[in-house]
Every structure is written in structure tokens, then in C-alpha cells.
Amino acid sequence: MRLHRNLCFAVIDGLHKIFNEGEYADKVIQQLLKRDKRWGSRDRGFVAETVYEIVRYKRLYAEIADVKAPFDRDNLWRIFAVWATLKGIKLPDWKYFTDTPTRKIKGRFDELSKIRKYRESIPDWIDELGEKELGSEEWTKELAMQNEQADVILRVNTLKTNKKDLQLKLQSENIETEFLSDHPYALKLKERANVFMTEAFKEGWFEVQDASSQLVADFLDVKPGMKVVDACAGAGGKTLHLASLMDNKGQVIAMDIYESKLKKLKVRARRNGVHNIEMKVIDSTKPIKKLYGKADRLLIDAPCSGLGVLRRNPDSKWKLQPEFVDNIKKTQGEILEQYSKMVKPGGKMVYATCSVLPSENQNQIDKFLTSEAGKDFTFVKDNNILAYKSGFDGFYMALLEKKK
């Protein structure tokens, strides 16, 4: 493989923005891919995958390169040289690569790979937290899986089509997919491709949504005609799934504290042919109080540490802080206490997170059920998904029922 100067410069610029300016990796990569119209799909693939890989293994590569944050451009080139050497790529005779100690790099890699926090490239505090909550064996396997590249999974929009027809339609656009057992609405791409450019996407036949995330709406046991509240809707992946499971009948109330996210949901709903969603911004306690005792079903897709989706957001492990995790647990408890009041007697609620930590999952449910707000609820079932077991994102969901 030959390294091309303009592609390598794009990678360095991207890393600078992510590591030194705190920008989000996915946004940075979107910008980089628009940088040169002459780039083909292979060029864009190189830029995106290289940036993600170096972000994923920042700690390991920086340790081997013997550089410390904040990284100047020379440091970033040294980290890049480590990445290239370990990939077996011959370094060109550019000034950035003079004196690269190729043999020493491989030796250091072998040495550091024996230590989990370097091998899986994770901050000390997250490594300690994960081990404390999951145990050494489970955490070691989970961390390794969280460094694998995530598959692209689609969720068929059953309001417009079915899985088989979607598969054929994508095939006609040269995109091969396969069915996933235990995931009734999912298609997995056999090779990565830009699915957003397809006719099928523009016509609203599918959304991109991880297989674990697709299980959440199903878990809520919705029926057409119900009043369903999605209380932390975000840009609405699960909201749209709920609407399709309800055959567009009844009402889905999508709520979020960010109006900008609900605006994105509006665009997606139009494309999906969904018209039973009402959107409400949570700008005070009023919108919640108005719905006390009114919802047949409530979904709380709670804010969390995101430690189940590091494969998709590898930069989040460098942005996450211990105090954030402590604060988010308090927020989860408060949301459960306040939002659960929207469920009517005989109604059901799902609490979900994309975290693998019991303290954000089972423990929150146990605490809620023994509280004043939770005394009218009974635990029905839960599903604790670890990435290393499922091959998909780490997720948790618990179904509770309110006594009649």
C-alpha cells in the first residue's frame, strides 16, 4: 500500500481537531470526506478508517511513539508512523518519517500489548470502573469487542416495505445484505457502503440502527391505537420504530430537552411516511406533568455513559470524565422518578441505556422499585446485552408494569 500525501495530511488535520480541539470524530470525518471532490471511495475509506483506528488506539500509539497530549503536528506524525508501521505499510521518505525506529515500534507494541489498558487503549479510571462492575474476565472480553469496527445494520421500515423486498432493492443498487436471526427487522451489510445515497433510503424504506437498539421498541409491547411516550427521543430512531410497530395508528409523543434533535426527527418522520408522532420540547416540568397518568406505554431511553457503544464513538472514551458518570447516574434516577408518573395504571414502561455498567442498569431499576415513585410498579423482565456475546452494541432494557 502506497501512502498519498494529501490523504495523510487529511488524517493529521482530523486527528488535530479531535485530540486537541475536542471536536467529535464523526463530525470531523464528515467534513474531511468533503475535502476533495477527486477522492474516490477507496480514498475516503482510507481517511475515515485511519482516523477512527488512531482515535481508537490513541493511548497505545502515543505510548509507543513516546509523545504526550496535547499533541503538536510532529507528535501526530509520529503517532501516524506507529500506526503505519504496525500495519506493515512502508513509510515514504518524507521529512515527517525520518528516524522512525521501525524495529523498536514492533518491540514496544509486543511489550505493551500484555497490559489491558494499553492493549485496548482505555483511560485508567474507565478500566478500573469496568473491572469493578463486570469483573476482570467479562470486562476484558467486552473491551476487546468494543475496539472492533461495528457492522452497518439497517432496520426495515415496515410501513413501506418488508425485509425481502428491501434486500432485493438494495441488491439492484449493488449493496449485498443478510438477515439476522433474533432481529426481525434487521439487515446487515456484507460490506460497508454509503447507504444514504441509495434510492431505498431516499424513499424511506429503512433507517440505519444497530441490532441491539432495534430490540428496545419491541420490548415495550406497543399496539396500534395506544398513547405512547418516548421521553428521551433524541433524533428519533426508536420513535420511528415505535410508530411502525403501531401501524401509524394511535399516538407517539416524542419528547426531548433538545429542540434541534426533534427537528431532525421531523425530517426523518416525513421520509419514513410516519404521521402519528407529536413532538414536545421539555423546556420545563410542565410538558411532563400534563401527561401524568396518561401513557399506555413509556420509553425512557436514558442518557448514560455510552460505554456500550464505544465501537461507534471511540473518541468518547477520551472525552468521558469520572464526574460525568457520577452525575449521569443521579440524572437517571431523577428521570425514572419524574417520568414514570406519566404511565397510567395497567400501563408499561421500558428503561433503556447503551451502557454495560450494572450501576446504570439493574441497580437503577432495583433502586427505583424500592422508592416511593416505584412502589406501584412491578418488574416484568430485562435484557442485558454485552457486545462480546451479541456481536452488536452493549445495551440494557428493563420492562416494568404499573399496578392497576
Image (cartoon, helix red, strand yellow):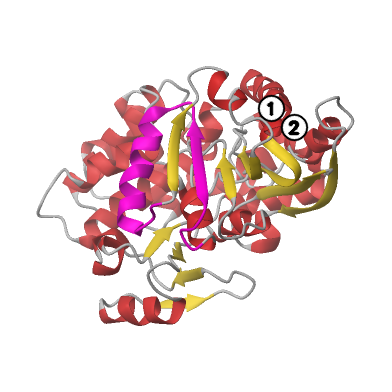
Label 1: few (<14), some (14–19) or many (≥20) C-alpha neighbours in 10 Å: few
Residues shaded magenta: 247-275
Q: Is residue 207 visible?
A: yes
Front position in the image: 309 or 370: 370
**The N terminus, quarter of image:** bottom left
Name the residue that disc number 1 marks. 125
Do labels 1 and 2 touch, CB within 8 Å? yes
x, y percent for residue 140: 73, 49
Q: What secondary structure is marked by label 2?
A: helix
x, y percent for residue 357: 73, 39
x, y percent for residue 288: 59, 26
Label 2: few (<14), some (14–19) or many (≥20) C-alpha neighbours in 10 Å: some
x, y percent for residue 318: 52, 30
Q: Is the residue 286 above or below the residue 314 in the image? A: above
- Residue 147 appears left or right of 263: right
Q: What residue do we see at 39% from left, 70% from top?
A: 191
- Specify the amino acid type for callout 2: Glu
- For residue 289: magenta? no
- Residue 397 appears left or right of 185: right
Q: What residue do we see at 70% from left, 48% from top?
A: 397
Q: Is the residue 275 above or below the residue 185 in the image? A: above
- Give residue 99's mark: none
- For residue 259: magenta? yes
Front position in the image: 276 or 26: 276
Name the residue that disc number 2 marks. 128
